[in-house]
Amino acid sequence: MKFFVDTGDINEISTLVETGMVDGVTTNPSLVASSGKDFVALVRDICQLVPGHVSAEVLATDVTTMLKEAEVLRTIADNVCIKVPLTVDGLKACKALSAEGTAVNVTLCFSAVQALLAAKAGATYVSPFIGRLDDVGESGMQLIRDIVNMYDNYPNLHTQVLAASIRSPSHVLESAMAGAHVATLPPKIIWQLYNHPLTDKGLAAFLKDWEKTGQKLI
């Protein structure tokens, strides 16, 4: 499974890149707004830090303007992935951009049939939102499983399932077990993946025993 970082915070991305766990980055208008930075400049800076895809979302809702905005965004760097909403116009834009060889992330997916449409439109990624479905009493994880299983029925579909709106390490585990290709994670969730009380306890015991030997390596 690939890990994308879901943030517009350059410092967070830079720190996480050093761990070797970052395969890409996803941004959205809300994350850009919270960063307080110029959108194009922010995407450019992120693309210089991360070799993988960096999702940059169009702001228009009509296909004509979406394509004009995409033209601006994809000239920022070779690893920009254009993010479009799962609407009729968004899928029209996806089909046009994909036909030109541009990577596209179709976002705001909440049903398996929507994911099927995204795949037929040539999306590189489809982003089902786990947490937001859980919030309204539906099963976000079941959606991930349904999409993965559906795609497996059709080898000619190459869209990757990008699990989004992840709220906990268990979401990451379940998405991986379900076969999602990518998980996009807030930085705090990535850091939580490292933690286990038994790891801390074991390390403390090892260090205590080593101290008793009175030895040093350097």
Image (tube, rainbow, N blue to C red):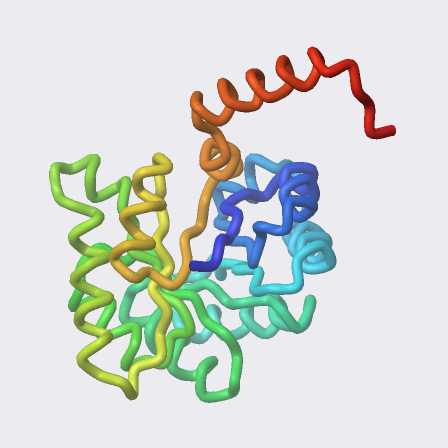
Image quadrant assignment for residue 182: bottom left
Which residue: 49% across, 61% down?
58
- When the figure is inspected, residue 56 is found, relative to residue 27, above or below; the finding is below
Q: Is residue 37 visible?
A: no
Image quadrant assignment for residue 43: bottom right
Residue positioned most to the left = 137
Q: Position of residue 137 (x, y in %)?
A: 12, 37
Which residue: 73% across, 58% down?
48
Residue positioned most to the front = 213
Asked whether 33 or 213 is in front, the reply is: 213
- When the figure is inspected, residue 152 is found, relative to residue 204, above or below; the finding is below
Asked whether 139 or 205 is in front, the reply is: 205
Which residue: 49% across, 58% down?
57
Which residue: 35% across, 36% down?
167
Q: Is residue 143 visible?
A: yes
Q: Would residue 126 appear left or right of 39 to someone viewing this image? A: left
Marks counted in the figure total: 0
Q: Would residue 91 appear left or right of 34 to someone viewing this image? A: left
Quadrant occupied by the C terminus: top right
Quadrant occupied by the N terminus: bottom left
Q: Position of residue 10 (x, y in %)?
A: 68, 42
Q: Position of residue 76 (x, y in %)?
A: 69, 67
Asked whether 90 or 133 is in front, the reply is: 133
Q: Position of residue 198 (x, y in %)?
A: 43, 23
